[in-house]
Amino acid sequence: MYKSHQLRKNRVSMPFHYYSVTTVTHVRNSLFTSFDIAKIAIRNLYLMDERQDTKTVCFVAMPDHIHWLFQLQDKLTLSETLAQFKGRSARAIKVFDRTIEKVWQDDYFEHCIRNEDDLLKQARYIVANPLRAQLVESIGQYPFWNCVYL
C-alpha cells in the first residue's frame, strides 16, 4: 500500500473506545460480490463480538473493502483485533475458494471516535456507503450491512 507506513503514525489503541476501521481486499479484488465470501467475512466480524474482543455498532461489506465501527474491549489492542479478524476471515475464505491466494491488503485505516456526534456521523457514513457507490437505490436492497441503530 502506498505510504502505508504513514497510517501507523500516531495510531492509538484504547480499551472501550470506539473505532471506525476500513480494510481493503488485496489489489482491491471484488471478493464481496460473492454472497458466500461476504457471509464468511461478516461471520468473522460477529465472531470478534462473540469472543468479547469487540462490540460491533455497524458494518458494511462493499465489493472490495469493509467498513466496521466497533467498541474495542480490553482483551486485544486495535492492531491485534484487526490481525485476528483478517487472519481468521482470510483462512476461511481461502478454504471456501482455493483459487484466492491473498485476501487483505496488509494495513487498514482507522478513526478513533471522539464523541457521540462523531459516532452517529460515522455510523451514518458507513451505512450509506452502498448508496454513495450507487450499488443500490435504498439501503434495504443491500444485503451486506447491519447497524445497531436501525
Image (tube, grey):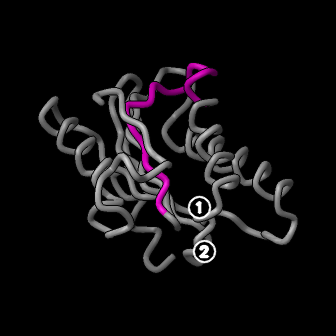
Which residue is pictured at 61% across the width and 53% down the height? 38
For the point 62% across and 71% down, which residue is it?
A: 26
Which quadrant is home to the C terminus?
A: top left
Q: Residue at x 25, y 38 (%)?
A: 113
SS type, badge 2: loop
Mark 1, residue position = 32
**Between residues 40 and 104, which one lies in front from this camera angle?**
40
Disc 2 marks which amino acid? Answer: Asn
Q: Residue at x 48, y 39 (%)?
A: 78
- In the rendered structure, the answer to whether residue 113 lies left or right of residue 41 reads left
**On the image, which quarter does residue 29 sit in?**
bottom right
| First to last magenta residue range | 48-62
> Which numbered disc covers residue 112?
none
Disc 2 to disc 1, C-alpha distance? 9 Å
At numbered mark 1, what does the secondary structure look like: helix, strand or loop?
A: helix
Residue 116 coordinates in the image, percent (x, y): 16, 29
- Marker disc for residue 29: 2
Quadrant housing residue 138 = bottom left
Q: Is residue 61 magenta?
A: yes
Q: Nearer the viewer, mark 2 or mark 1?
A: 1
Tell me if residue 71 is in the magenta stretch. Answer: no
Residue type at tag 1: Phe
Asked whether, in this view, residue 44 is left or right of residue 58, the answer is: right
